[in-house]
Amino acid sequence: MKKRREFLEQLSEVEHEMLKVTGGLDMEMADQMRENVIGITKIPLGLAENFRINGKEILIPIATEERSVITQASTGAGLVDNFEASTTGNIMIGQIQLLDIPDMEKAKKAVLAEKEALLVDANTLSRSRKAVDLTVKALDSAVGSMLIVQIYADVRDSMGANLVDSMCELLAPTIAKITGGRVNMRILSNLATKRMVRVSATVPKERIGADVVDKIITADAFAWADPYRASTSNKGIMNGIIGLLLATSNDIRAVEAGAHSYAAITGTYRPLTKWTKTENGDLYGELEMPMSVGTVGGVVRTHKLAGIVLRLLGAETAAELSMIAGSVGLASNLGALYIMVTEGIKSIQA
Ligand code: MEV
């Protein structure tokens, strides 16, 4: 494959060798990264083709142990001319849980009255990444009422968990004093609804046939009507996303948790994509989900493979990586649906 050769030609000899032999991670680095290291696991890294995202052609490295994941993503991408992708920004949410609040309404007002001062405090932690808002909510729970204070921080190109956790821990004692309550929890939320990616794509009906357009819409309706099918549909979406994020050393568990909790945000578990027909009979797909990824900080820059993959993707910012990931998700879903309503999934798994 010409593109694959061109892609690999962008690597130095050392990088090329590293990719094939150590996967970009040796024991010494692994030992520095994590506790109690006894070895390194490896999984195949492949390239998904046919992607044009916001007008730019991109080859997508995907790390996966599963046969057909790369084919599903490439097949879906090959059916559309362009993925239109956007993000809502890089705001992550942190939560502080307070108990034994003597007067809930008074406590809520008192925290909001101190909002500016609390944000100033939180913003002593980083020069460039800033807390931008703070909200309060009372919850009734199995152990009685509790006050939850939420901090919203613009974490820019980092994943942001460390910073947000630190902000929560820093502000908690002051908030306890203001409210007269007792702090229990101080932690990031992975339901990153202020860090969403949105992607849309159109498949011309001439490309797949009007009957296949209808079959895909019917398959999608099944997923919207049945959580058992929605679960599998979302698994297919995450096949590509997780493969890409693994290759860039992102926290895949955070993205997975955000995806599934967003899928259930209405109280019913739903698909992360929606397929409809345009006025002229083309197939139109949309994906919307939280995407808490980083291109700086954490292990993203210490793991050599992640650095190489980000460079080859041309993704310098979290927003760029997020839009690529969302597009891979929509393509994976489309590819899987197309294959399932035509040849059947076993046709690509043999
Ligand atoms: C398999 O890894 C993924 C699929 O099950 C996705 C789907 O059913 O939509 C094929």
Image (tube, helix red, strand yellow):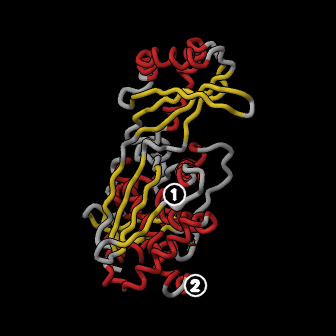
Location of the N terminus (image quadrant): bottom left
Q: Which amino acid type is marked by label 2?
A: Lys
In the current view of this chain or complex, which residue is farthest to the front?
A: 279
- The answer to which of marks 2 and 1 sits earlier in the sequence is 1
Quarter where residue 39 is shown: bottom right
- Percent coordinates x, y for residue 72 in the rendering: 47, 75
| Residue sitting nearer the eye, 178 or 321 | 178
Taking the image in four quarters, ligand 1 sits in the one at bottom right
Checking the image for residue 262, the label placed there is none
- Whether residue 11 sits left or right of residue 232 in the image: it is left
Q: Residue at the location (55% across, 39% down)?
A: 189
For marks 2 and 1, give the one nearer the viewer.
2
Does residue 72 appear in this view?
A: yes
| Residue sitting nearer the eye, 234 or 161 | 234
Relative vertical location of residue 176 with respect to residue 76 in this rendering, above or below: above
**Residue carrying label 1:** 246
